[in-house]
Amino acid sequence: MKVKHVDNVGLVAQMSGQTWYHLLTECLPRLLLLLPLLPPGASLIVPPAVPSLRNALTLLANWTGPLLHTSARVRYKASKLTTVDWRATYAPAHGPSTDFCAPRAALQLLRTTAWGAVGLQSAVLGNDQTRWPPRMIYVSRADAKTRDVNNEKDLLHHLNVTAKQCGVALEIFRGSEKSLQDTIRLFSNIRLVIGPHGSGLANIAFCRPNTPVIEIGLPNTQDLIFYAHLSAALELDYHYLVASPLTEGDTASGLRGSIVVNIQDAVMLTATSLVQHGCKPPSND
């Protein structure tokens, strides 16, 4: 294994840091807290290179310094290593752990930093909803290899009807199709977010307080509290919609297999959440 000697270095890399949820809600908050502690000219140890990494570091942290990517082939030996971490609570006998859940203050810092980075802070904090048409987002995993919604076409049809009846537009979000800047602007002014458990839901980190969030998952994945925690930390209105595995009885592959959504339940929860947050009730026309 190659050993690389470095002087001052900051560490924000972690397990699964190359995936968007962990990069956005753990690595980047660590970096924002770490920046005042790093001396000029320091390097940064980050997760393996992914297309979104450099842009996120530049936009949200104004980082232009050298990057050192974690690798099984390289070991870094630093004269001074600085990192920021937080304690996770493990309570398997009493409920889910908070592993992979950043503290509230760190997540709120991430959100206000993201808003400011795209010039939206004053508008969002002022609750200005006049600059964009009212809309809700469905976060699709149709282009993913896991946890796709098997009846998504039918689900989207009914969600679109419900959205129109409530006076909002439905927008389908696929993370691979939008820049980080556009993603922040989109999620910062919407009426509701709904979608299956997956990294795309991490973008609720940019939502205004009180935005309804509906996570779709299986009964055996409800203890994965990533998005429930993120919603609580950012004062979002969180709901969990229980779906079914595509193959009857197949709950062991809850993080990998396809799922089927009860469309009536999804429509009812969506309509109720929209109305509770100021949209008009759906008609029966």
Image (cartoon, helix red, strand yellow):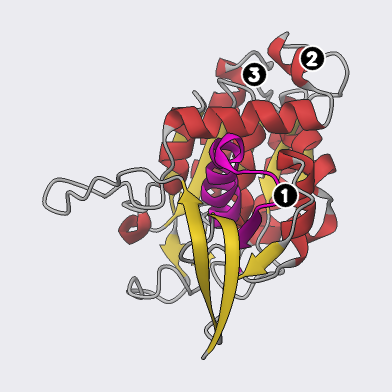
Q: Amino acid at mark 3?
A: Pro
Of mark 3 and mark 1, the one earlier in the sequence is 1
Q: Mark number for residue 260?
A: none
The residues bearing labels 2 and 3 have C-alpha atoms spaced at a distance of 27 Å
Tell me, for residue 281, which label it has, or none: 3
At 58% from the left and 73% from the top, the residue drawn is: 5
Quadrant in which the C terminus appears: top right
Residue 47 versus residue 234 in the image, above or below: below
Q: Which residue is mark 2?
A: 123
Q: In the image, is residue 184 above or below residue 248?
A: above
User: In the image, 122: left or right of 191?
Assistant: right
Percent from the top left, x then y, of residue 228?
Answer: 42, 39
Residue 113 makes an appearance in the image: yes
Residue at horizontal 79 percent and vertical 24 percent from the top: 134
Q: Is residue 20 above or below residue 251?
A: above
Residues 260 and 22: in front is 22
Magenta span of residues: 21-47
Q: Is residue 107 left or right of residue 136?
A: left
Percent across and percent down for residue 106 are 50, 33
Residue 217 coordinates in the image, percent (x, y)? 45, 55
Instruction: Give yes or no for contact between labels 2 and 3 (Cβ–Cβ under 8 Å).
Output: no
Foreground of the two, 276 or 19: 19
Relative to the observer, which residue lies in front, 178 or 146?
178
Using a 10 Å C-alpha cutoff, classify the residue at mark 3 as few (fewer than 14 neighbours), some (14 to 19) or many (20 or more).
some
> Tag on residue 57?
1
Looking at the image, is 191 positioned above or below residue 264? above
Which is more toward the observer, 274 or 184?
184
Name the chief secondary structure element in magenta.
Answer: helix
Mark 1 secondary-structure assignment:
helix
State which tag comes first along the sequence, 2 or 3: 2
Query: Quadrant of the rendered structure where residue 167 is?
Result: top right
Residue 18 visible in image: no
